[in-house]
Image (tube, helix red, strand yellow):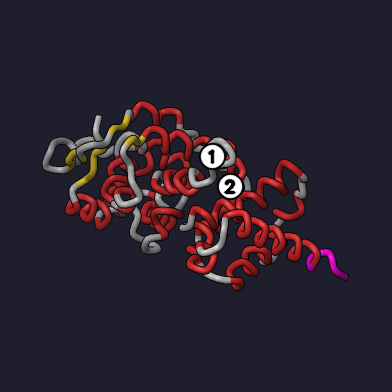
Amino acid sequence: MTFKLMKRGVVHRLYLDIEKNLDRYVSGNFEDLLDGTDFVRDIDETEVDENDFASLNPERGGAHDAENAFIVFKAMKGMTPYLARDERIWAYLTHTCCLDFTRKRWLRAEQDEEKLSRLIRSHFFARIGGDRAFERNNALSSLWWWAYISSHYEKAPLHETLDAFLKYTDLRSSIVERPTTSRSKKVFSALMDSVFKRLYEEPKPEFFVRRGNTGIYREWLKSINRYGGIRLFDAREANDLSELFENLAVAAEQNASAP
């Protein structure tokens, strides 16, 4: 079947009525509110099997995030970065076939109404945080975007790149939230060269440890940001960029071990 999206007015009404619909979010459904073409429409030249979403795992953790991102990315044929910034697609999924996954992943019945409402606004919709809401917050769009970013790395299969990219949630967030490191295929690939090296080739788990507001990987990413922006990095050859990022990673490690 083709992708479906809620009509804009329907999304807006649901957003305004979150408090009225808390019981639906926690344990009910929206079938009676979303029945018929007055509420949703199809997107041509797309294809999705909603049954694929049944295997999404709501448990927390980088390994589950990697598994879920792979499922969503492979299931949604015809998805583009342009479409992936349309809140109506993701709101349809979180309120229909992925409602159970989204509630189990983010909601708890014992949470007070204020917290429930805040979590629903963040993870069932995609409007808090601007463009970054799609990459960080919405329960489904974030998975797709993580896989899309990971698909830029051509030196490993997608599932392996996802495992590496999502293993440490703060590393993932630090990369996603920096346009310099997430929006360029060349930059992301150079980053992943150093990440793969420290995860698998010459394991250095201490590189990924967060200590309070610090950590070697954080200092590494800061040094990359200081060194230049996307245009400067994209002007370099891929091998040169990978070598530069590796040198900056080594320097961050040396600074961390200095007395």
**Residue 17 position by quadrant:** bottom left
Mark 1 closeness class: few <14, some 14–19, many ≥20 residues within 10 Å: many
Outermost residue toward the bottom in this view: 226
Q: CA distance from mark 1 to mark 2?
A: 8 Å
Q: Give the residue type at disc 2.
A: Phe
Nearer to us in this view, 239 or 111: 239
Left or right of 220? Residue 105 is left
Outermost residue toward the right in this view: 259
150 in the magenta segment: no
**Residue 115 position by quadrant:** bottom left
| As drawn, 214 above or below 74 | below
Q: At 36% from the left edge and 38% from the top edge, which residue is drawn?
A: 99
Mark 2 closeness class: few <14, some 14–19, many ≥20 residues within 10 Å: many
The part of the chain drawn in magenta is: 255-259
Measuring from the top left, give residue 41's x and y in whole percent. Answer: 17, 40
Kindly check if marks 1 and 2 are in contact, taking CB atoms under 8 A apart as contact.
yes
In the picture of the structure, the residue carrying the numbered disc 2 is 165
In the picture of the structure, the residue carrying the numbered disc 1 is 66
Q: Secondary structure at mark 1?
A: helix
256 in the magenta segment: yes
Measuring from the top left, give residue 178's x and y in whole percent. Answer: 51, 63
Instruction: Count every numbered label the image shows and give the total.
Output: 2
Left or right of 100? Residue 178 is right
